Image (spheres, helix red, strand yellow):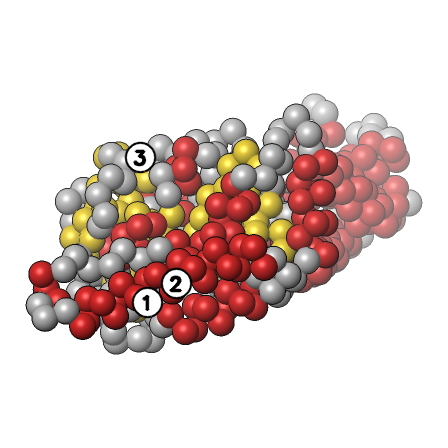
Amino acid sequence: MNLLTIAWKSLRQRRLASSLTALSIALGVMLMVLVLVIFGAVNSAFTQRSVGYDLIVGPKGSELQLVLSAVYRMQPPIENLPYPYLEQLRRDRRVVSAVPLAFGDVTEQGDFPIVGTTPDYFENDYMPGQKFLMRGQRIGKLFDAIIGAAVARENGWDLGTSFSIVHGGAESEDVHDEKFTVVAVLAPTGTANDRTVFLNLQGFYAIAGHEKPIDEVEKRLRDFYSADPERLAASLQQTQQYREAIAARAAAADPGALPAPVSPEAMKEVTAILVRTRPETPFDAISLSAELKKGIQAMAVNPVRPIQRLMSGLIGNVQKALVVLTVIIILVSGVGIFVSIYNSMSDRRREIGIMRALGAGRHHVFGIVLAESALLCCGGGLTGWLAGHGLAIASAPWVIRQTGLLINPWALNSLEVWLFPILAGLAVLVGFLPAMTAYRTDVADALAS
């Protein structure tokens, strides 16, 4: 009979105390696994793997706010950029793709953010190597819409559903008259796209109330193109022609007989521009970002760096604090194992004496006690590890519904690799003193007790 078998039978004789001490280890390990799984999903969502673009171009301001609004839709946008700047950026030789985004409204049902964009948005990868999958057709008509998986699930919408949007945000009661129709539903992506409604950019501009007064637009154009007189003159020429067309229609004897003036590009704005540069020349993104940083018009932000600073400065510290807390729980559980085994030594002196009398050496008795400690630590740890991942599997659908994060419950964190070696070391540490007590037990005194 080997030492592990004897140790197992000894633990079964004290099954209640053994189960409780192993349970304390299991709960600590389970909590650690859950912390690592959840923060692993958060880390995956807020890294380069969740962004398929090299740069985000937006108005001057906070880099973090620009990324959180454009990519994660968790912050209001800084301001807007003139639409002609989008065309200017597209003509840059370094730019492969420039996709506009226009924000400002939410759905009447569910308060999901509205994003006006172009079909190019769905042609590009939403993550490196990950393409959009959708059920339905691409946006074709002015008031077509594509909805994310979470929007479809929570609102109960499907192909053909008509809906209204609210102007200015969830707290507003100004519901637009226009009705939009769902033409496609995106497959789950685990990104903010799941909780977003996408409109045809031209349809977004056609919504009543989205066009700003001409005087305000002209002032913003003068500020934006103050260092570029040629483009400023071209833009102001468009707004002046638009002003004259509106005035001519208003002065006509029968204004309804004349077609409504078409809003020129200079009257339109975009909130942010998602930019992909030439993959064969990685320096393009750096040079474009540095160039814009020197100017006064806009800024280009690598979508990863602000999030990495946020993760390392705030979320990373929270993760470390929770991991340290679970380590303390496991250490306290180890102290419980030490107390349980050590206190049992006085009740087992006779048992140890009998084993010694039957031929067991001191080192055999020493090994049995260490084996008991190892079974409690490693057995409890294995139970907690399985329970942690099992609970993650069971709760993953609910977490996905609530947060949109795609969780892989069996994804191993690098810290988990050290879990069982550490537990084995803890077993030796807490079992050494009780094992030495058994090792030093006098056979005659033990049998006489």
Q: Is residue 113 left or right of residue 390?
A: left
Q: Which residue is painted at 68% across and 58% down in the image?
A: 295
Instruction: Find the distance from the CA under tag 1 to the CA under tag 2.
Output: 6 Å
The residue most toward the top is 1
Q: Amino acid at mark 1?
A: Arg
Q: Which residue is painted at 60% across and 35% down in the image?
A: 93
Q: Nearer the viewer, mark 1 or mark 3?
A: 1
Q: Is residue 71 visible?
A: no
Q: Which disc number belongs to residue 134?
A: 3
Q: Amino acid at mark 2?
A: Thr
SS of the residue under disc 1: helix
Q: Nearer the viewer, mark 2 or mark 3?
A: 2
Residue matched to label 1: 243
Q: Is residue 401 left or right of residue 361?
A: left
Return the disc, 2 or 3, that comes first in the chain's sequence. 3
Relative image position of residue 248 (x, y in whole percent): 22, 67
Return the disc, 1 or 3, that comes first in the chain's sequence. 3
Answer yes or no: do the residues labelled 1 and 3 have beta carbons within 8 Å?
Answer: no
Looking at the image, is 377 positioned above or below residue 247?
Answer: above
Front residue of this view, candidates 411 and 117? 117
Residue matched to label 2: 239
Q: Amino acid at mark 3?
A: Met
SS of the residue under disc 2: helix
Front residue of this view, candidates 312 and 408? 312
Relative image position of residue 269 (x, y in whole percent): 43, 59
Front residue of this view, candidates 283 and 10? 283
Q: Is residue 140 visible?
A: yes
Answer yes or no: do the residues labelled 1 and 2 have beta carbons within 8 Å?
Answer: yes
Instruction: Find the distance from the CA under tag 2 to the CA under tag 3.
Output: 39 Å
